[in-house]
Image (spheres, grey):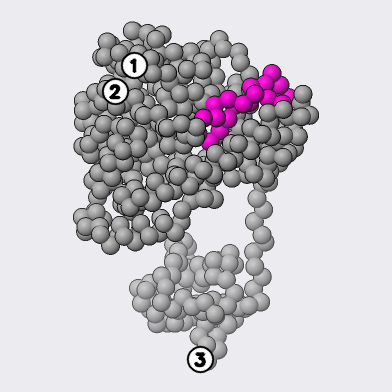
């Protein structure tokens, strides 16, 4: 039997009538709505009266009235209890979604079923034990020094980023970072002609930059713009790395126009067929802002990302992260710092890299009779080059499989007309969905 004797007990005593009437009505409604379910033992009249700041007799009279009405029962030695015979409220009906999707293979999240729970709990315990008391006070808009220090070491070692903790600002995601840069940069920003439409929508205005097998054509960056956004390690969604000549060209452009390259390194750790491509930021930290996130390697639920900024942008960004911008959970920051420093992050990435590579190989084997696969040297998704984009998307949806047409990612001002399907092999549903998806491709030939 559940007891409310030592728990906070919320009752609304507002409304018309005397105090006893209002108390009786509030208790009656709490029982009727099942906020107090059958079998719940109520506080003693003396205890509830003390909590509410009213006379004990008022509570006793309210209890007696509800016992007489059958809402409560009272027995010697058992206290006052919500009557078992009170009917529960009717079940809440929820609108059923129109979608019949069984397998979501759209490009969104990593395999969240593989989140390293045990290792994360260990890091949480260590982080809490070692945390100074001041860590539990108001947050630092730049992020905890423990996390910024761990990130500086990891990014230098694993991604070739030139950083120190004072240049790192922690934020809640890539979109959070872009929203702040949008307030600082010129209205029109150059973006790759293929990318997430949501990210383009965060800017006041965007100009598309052509993309081919060598990544974005940075040699075409216009001198009348001051900022561009690139995915150099693994172009999203087409998949190619930025050619070394074009990496150098992007930096030369930024120096020439005194501009800024925003480097989105969304999945640079997951490369399979050769060594990971280092960050462009390493070529010129004063003209490249490096943006990373925990969303792909760990989970989007963490809402932790980071910016490694040119020195001249640190103070302006922090000025925007005042009361207008939420701070990131101190506990999550300290835990991630330990997770990085202990080597657990590296171990998790290596394990997932092997898992994703095996999934990629299965995808290539299953779909190669029907489509050429590209963009598979890294990441968690692949592009199937096919003229049957519309038919495949429609047929897959009819069979409960959701995939993304390549055209969804194309800039509205782009004149490129290639077609294809973007498939996530990192999605949790991928292993179960692959046989059915291969049947869809065969049916659309």
- Marked residue nearer the N-terminal end (1 or 2): 1
Q: Which mark is residue 77?
A: 3
Q: Quadrant of residue 403?
A: top right
Which one is in front in this view, the residue at disc 1 or the one at disc 3? 1
Label 1 residue SS? helix
Q: Is residue 19 above or below residue 111?
A: below
Relative vertical location of residue 422 with respect to residue 142 in this rendering, above or below: above
Q: Which residue is mark 2?
A: 283
Which residue is more in the foreground, 407 or 424? 424
Where does the magenta region start and end? 370-394
In the displayed image of the protein, which residue is found farthest to the right? 443
Rendered residue at 68%/39% (across/down): 434
CB atoms of marks 1 and 3 within 8 Å:
no
* Residue occupied by mark 1: 248
Residue 181 x/y as whole percent? 33, 26
Left or right: residue 237 compared with residue 190: right
């Amino acid at each position: 039997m559940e007891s409310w004797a030592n728990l906070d007990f919320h009752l609304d005593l507002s409304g018309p009538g005397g105090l006893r009437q209002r108390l009786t009505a509030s208790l009656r409604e709490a029982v009727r709505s099942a906020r107090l379910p059958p079998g719940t033992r109520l506080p003693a009249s003396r205890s509830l009266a003390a909590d509410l700041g009213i006379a004990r007799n008022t509570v006793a009279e309210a209890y007696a009235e509800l016992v007489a009405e059958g809402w409560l029962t009272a027995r010697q030695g058992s206290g006052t209890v919500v009557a078992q015979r009170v009917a529960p409220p009717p079940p809440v009906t929820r609108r059923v979604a129109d979608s019949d999707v069984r397998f979501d293979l759209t490009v969104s999240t990593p395999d969240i079923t593989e989140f390293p729970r045990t290792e994360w709990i260990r890091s949480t315990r260590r982080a809490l034990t070692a945390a100074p008391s001041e860590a539990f006070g108001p947050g630092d808009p730049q992020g905890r020094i423990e996390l910024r220090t761990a990130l500086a070491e990891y990014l230098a070692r694993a991604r070739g980023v030139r950083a120190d903790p004072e240049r790192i600002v922690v934020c809640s995601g890539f979109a959070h970072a872009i929203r702040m840069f949008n307030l600082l940069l010129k209205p029109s920003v150059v973006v790759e002609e293929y990318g997430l439409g949501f990210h383009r929508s965060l800017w006041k205005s965007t100009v598309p930059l052509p993309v081919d097998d060598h990544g974005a054509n940075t040699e075409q960056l216009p001198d009348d713009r001051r900022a561009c956004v690139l995915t150099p390690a693994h172009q999203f969604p087409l998949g190619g790395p930025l050619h070394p000549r074009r990496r150098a060209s992007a930096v030369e452009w930024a120096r020439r126009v005194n501009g800024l390259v925003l480097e989105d390194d969304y999945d640079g750790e997951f490369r399979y067929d050769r060594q990971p491509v280092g960050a462009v930021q390493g070529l010129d930290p004063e003209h490249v802002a490096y943006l990373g996130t925990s969303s792909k390697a760990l989970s989007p639920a963490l809402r932790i990302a980071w910016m490694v900024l040119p020195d001249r942008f640190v103070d302006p960004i922090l000025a925007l992260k005042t009361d207008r911008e939420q701070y990131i959970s101190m506990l999550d920051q300290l835990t991630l710092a330990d997770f990085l420093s202990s080597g657990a992050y590296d171990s998790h990435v290596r394990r997932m890299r092997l898992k994703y590579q095996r999934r990629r190989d299965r995808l290539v084997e299953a779909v190669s009779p029907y489509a050429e696969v590209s963009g598979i040297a890294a990441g968690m998704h692949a592009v199937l080059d096919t003229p049957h984009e519309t038919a495949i998307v429609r047929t897959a949806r009819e069979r409960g499989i959701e995939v993304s047409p390549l055209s969804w990612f194309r800039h509205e001002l782009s004149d490129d007309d290639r077609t294809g399907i973007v498939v996530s092999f990192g999605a949790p549903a991928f292993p179960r969905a692959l046989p059915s998806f291969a049947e869809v491709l065969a049916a659309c030939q």
